Image (cartoon, rainbow, N blue to C red):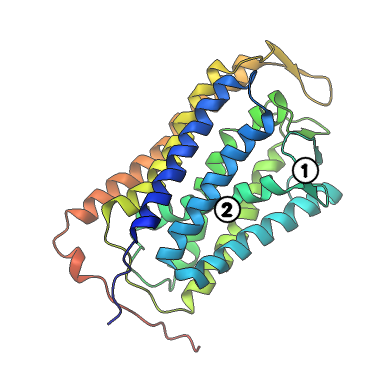
Amino acid sequence: MAMNPVTAKWQTHLLWTMLLLYVLARVCQLYADRLPALLIVILHVVPPAVFAAVHGSILYRVRGMLAFTTFCVGVAGLCESLSLRTGFPFGHYYFTNVMGPKILNVPILLILAYLGIGYCSWVLSLLILGYRNKPLVGVRVVALPMLASFIMLAWDLSMEPDWATVDRAWIWRDGGSFYGVPISNFLGWYLTAYLFYQAFALYCRARPVQPPPTSRSYWRAPILFYGICAFGNLLLLRLPMAPPVVMDATGKPWITMDILRTDALMSLLVMGPMALLAWLRLREKESDPNEAHQVSVVRTMQPE
């Protein structure tokens, strides 16, 4: 029988340090007129990525987290690069210099941004569906990626118009009906997330199920990360230096406060419930007296 993984003290300290740094990143938005834009972007991207790497290496071991990172970063980079050249799957756009250095016209920090929230969305899905100690077989192999993709799409819905139309970190060449963002972007986001989640689900199906960590704080941390991301978006309502009206690439004007209020609404009504549902599902498991007896190593019938 495999033993439950134990979270080392340095790992616990690092996880919560990254969480606090992410809180700092959201607060820094209020001082966008005084702080370098690239610093704010780095604080938004790097702590979640480091958090994912540490948290995931405990849950899936280092090899499993390397697989998740490879699928996530690889598919995201490929889809972003493809869309820049062809318009598929997101639409026609280009990046400005707001997000820093690029490789093949794609900002490095943008690709890294997929990893942090992408991993947290996966963990929330595990908790909501009750799969954290169950083998990924049958319908679970598809259900988990589908839900995780929706949870990650909620993140994009809550911040895309701000980053694109207000902050102009990237420009949609033909504008779009969602405050200057085309609907194709969100379809592309779901497809991109689904592809790398599905690849990882198939990877997990061919591996034995490892007993999950039993620490409550370990499982609460990614929920808090996603929740802080959601409620941190409410601070956008006090975004400094934002002009009252912004224009997309086609010259169509948009009222800035309409954009920011919509972002806040998406955060409250879509992202918030996902975090709350995962938290409540976790509490149900913690109160289940049989939970301790459900953790076992299960091999699938798939050949190695």
Q: Residue furthest top?
A: 244
Total residue callouts: 2
Question: What residue do we see at 51% from left, 30% from top?
Answer: 26
Please indicate, yes or no, whether residue 200 appears anywhere in the rendered image.
yes
Q: Mark 2 or 1 closer to N-term?
A: 1
> Does residue 172 appear to the left or right of 8 in the view shown?
right
Distance Cα–Cα, label 2 vs label 1: 22 Å
Task: Give SS at disc 1.
Answer: loop
Q: Residue furthest bottom?
A: 303
> Does residue 19 appear to the left or right of 243 in the view shown?
left
User: Which quadrant is home to the N terminus?
Assistant: bottom left
The residue wearing badge 2 is: 115
Vertical position of residue 280 compared to residue 285: above or below = above
Question: Alpha-carbon neighbours of circle 2 within 10 Å: few (<14), some, or many (≥20)?
Answer: many
Q: Amino acid at mark 1?
A: Gly
> Does residue 45 appear to the left or right of 301 in the view shown?
right
Q: Position of residue 136 (x, y in %)?
A: 43, 71
Question: What residue do we see at 48% from left, 38% from top?
Answer: 21
Residue 17 lies in quadrant: top left
> Does residue 174 appear to the left or right of 254 in the view shown?
right
Q: Position of residue 271 (x, y in %)?
A: 46, 38
Task: Give SS at disc 2.
Answer: helix
Vertical position of residue 12 compared to residue 3: above or below = above
Vertical position of residue 198 compared to residue 87: above or below = below
Q: Amino acid at mark 2?
A: Leu
- Cβ atoms under marks 2 and 1 closer than 8 Å: no
The residue wearing badge 1 is: 91
